Amino acid sequence: MTKILLVEDNEMNRDMLARRLARKGYQVILACDGQEAIDKAQTEDPAIILMDLSLPVLDGWEATRQLKADPATAEIPIIALTAHAIANDREEALRCGCDDFDTKPIDMERLLSKVTSFLG
């Protein structure tokens, strides 16, 4: 079963998205902040990471930079998720290492299409 690391600090968003991904057949690993995301990426070996950018402890921007700088996790695709749809957020997310970008509220079909394209 393909593992997805879902990094989301909002409990309702995390629960809803995790349930929807699980119904699609994915094993969902959860993290609530950027540091937990790094720890779980190193121990759980996810196939892809869905990274909220506004997180406590360590934000998604910095967590992504650290994951991409670590040879053990650098190749894991990261899709940034954010409610802030400011034009330069997409460019900044890609610059800090995200492989793609999606906005909240989540359009599940669009997100699944992106996930599938990375997983092949």
Image: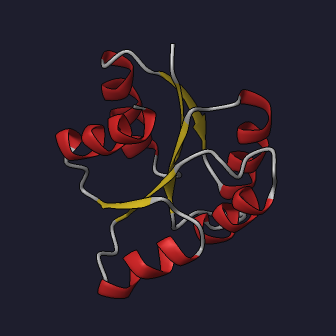
So how many labels did they put on this image? 0
Quadrant including the C terminus: top left
Question: Is residue 120 shown left or right of residue 86?
Answer: right
Q: Nearer the viewer, residue 32 or 66?
A: 66
Residue ID at (51%, 12%) = 1
> Closest to the observer: 54 or 109?
109
- Measuring from the top left, give residue 115's x and y in whole percent: 37, 39
- Tell me: residue 114, above or below residue 100: above
Q: Position of residue 63 (x, y in %)?
A: 68, 62
**Residue 6 horizontal/vertical position (percent):** 51, 40
114 vs 70: above or below:
above
Where residue 99 sits in the image (x, y, percent)? 48, 59
In the displayed structure, would residue 92 be above or below residue 105? Answer: below
| Above or below 2: residue 69 | below
Residue at image coords 79%, 43%: 39
From this viewpoint, which residue is outermost toward the front?
Answer: 120
Q: How is the image coloured?
A: secondary structure
Q: Is residue 119 left or right of residue 110?
A: right
Question: Looking at the rendering, which quadrant does residue 85 occupy?
Answer: bottom left
